[in-house]
Image (cartoon, helix red, strand yellow):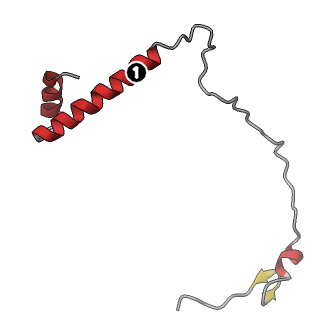
């Protein structure tokens, strides 16, 4: 990135960077550009294009309605029940 580009970005984003911050940012961008050059030098002509590195599998089970627990089994742990309903202390007056 060049100083002119940084000046435009600074103006568009309404930033006021110090000279030290500008130098640090330009050095950071320069190091990223060097890393990009290294990556671009790698021959990827034999690599298949893909969206994900690992295959994505969607495991879907059959949607079957079932009742795994009976009401009586669930109410066994209740402190008190009345006609199939849990009895709890009143919270709101």
Query: Which quarter of the rendering shows the N terminus?
Result: top left
Q: Position of residue 9 (x, y in %)?
A: 18, 29
Which quadrant holds residue 30? top left
Taking 76 as reference, is 30 left or right? left
Q: Residue at x 73, y 87 (%)?
A: 87
Q: Residue at x 28, y 33 (%)?
A: 28
Looking at the image, how many numbered discs can be counted on the residues? Answer: 1
Q: Position of residue 64 (x, y in %)?
A: 85, 48
Q: Secondary structure at mark 1?
A: helix
> Which is more toward the observer, 87 or 36?
36
Q: Identify the residue at the far top of this view.
A: 45
Which quadrant holds residue 58? top right
> Which is more toward the observer, 73 or 59?
59
Taking 47 as reference, is 64 left or right? right
Taking 48 as reference, is 70 left or right? right
Q: Residue at x 22, y 30 (%)?
A: 26
Q: Position of residue 17 (x, y in %)?
A: 13, 40
Note whether residue 93 is visible. yes
Q: Is residue 22 above or below residue 70?
A: above
Tell me the residue that label 1 is attached to: 36
Note whether residue 15 is visible. no
Q: Residue at x 85, y 73 (%)?
A: 71
Q: Is residue 70 above or below residue 9?
A: below
> Which is more toward the observer, 23 or 11?
23
Taking 72 as reference, is 44 left or right? left
Which quadrant holds residue 15? top left
Q: Position of residue 34 (x, y in %)?
A: 35, 22
Quick one: label 1, few (<14), some, or many (20+) residues within 10 Å? few
């Amino acid at each position: 990135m060049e100083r002119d580009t940084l000046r435009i970005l600074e103006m568009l984003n309404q930033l006021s960077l110090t000279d030290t911050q500008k130098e640090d940012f330009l050095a950071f961008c320069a190091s990223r550009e060097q890393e990009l050059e290294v990556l671009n030098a790698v021959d990827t002509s034999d690599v298949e294009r893909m969206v994900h590195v690992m295959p994505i599998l969607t495991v879907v089970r059959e949607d079957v309605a079932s009742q795994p627990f009976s009401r009586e089994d669930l109410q066994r742990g209740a402190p008190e029940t009345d006609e199939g309903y849990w009895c709890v202390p009143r919270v709101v007056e």
